[in-house]
Amino acid sequence: MKLRGTLTTATVRLGLAAAALAGALACATVAPATAAPERVQGCGWNESRGGERAYYEHCATNTNVWIQVKRWPRSNYHRCVGPGRTNLDFDATGAWYDSNYRGGLCAHPGDTGP
């Protein structure tokens, strides 16, 4: 009788382990072998969401450009950005490419101007 109870307990444990493994595999996600690069939310200004800071996404791959950053309550300013994402100030309320500032192109991402 004791042997029968031991087999039942072992069978139940094995069944629970199999169910847990099946659940874990069902929830797992596997990236394809040729995973696509991270999707860009949008070129240009992207407002802050879910605790993430606002940022400017410069989608060109071969230029650095001047953007104007609008802030509140502090004053606006210009910033040189390179390709990709540039996180902006905590109080940024907008940003856009400014082709009129120093010709629109710049050499050193991170530089700032009035």
Image (spheres, helix red, strand yellow):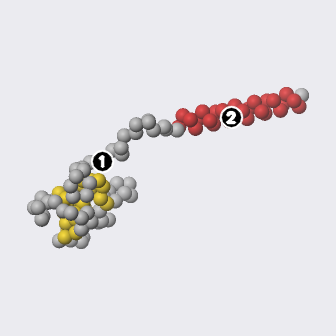
Name the amino acid, label 1. Gln
Q: Residue at x 12, y 58 (%)?
A: 99
Confirm whether residue 71 shows in the render: no
Specify the quadrant that holds the C terminus.
bottom left
**How would you rate the neighbour count of disc 2 (Cα within 10 Å): few for under 14, some for 14-19, many for 20 or more?**
few
Question: Tag on residue 16?
Answer: 2
Q: Name the spot of residue 24 as percent of width and height, x first.
A: 58, 38
Image quadrant assignment for residue 101: bottom left
Q: Which is more toward the observer, 102 or 52?
A: 102
Name the amino acid, label 2. Leu
Image height check: is 88 above or below 7?
A: below
Confirm whether residue 28 shows in the render: yes
Image quadrant assignment for residue 2: top right
Image height check: is 112 above or below 23?
A: below
Q: Name the spot of residue 103 as percent of width and height, x first.
A: 11, 61
Q: Residue at x 14, y 60 (%)?
A: 104
Q: Secondary structure at mark 2?
A: helix
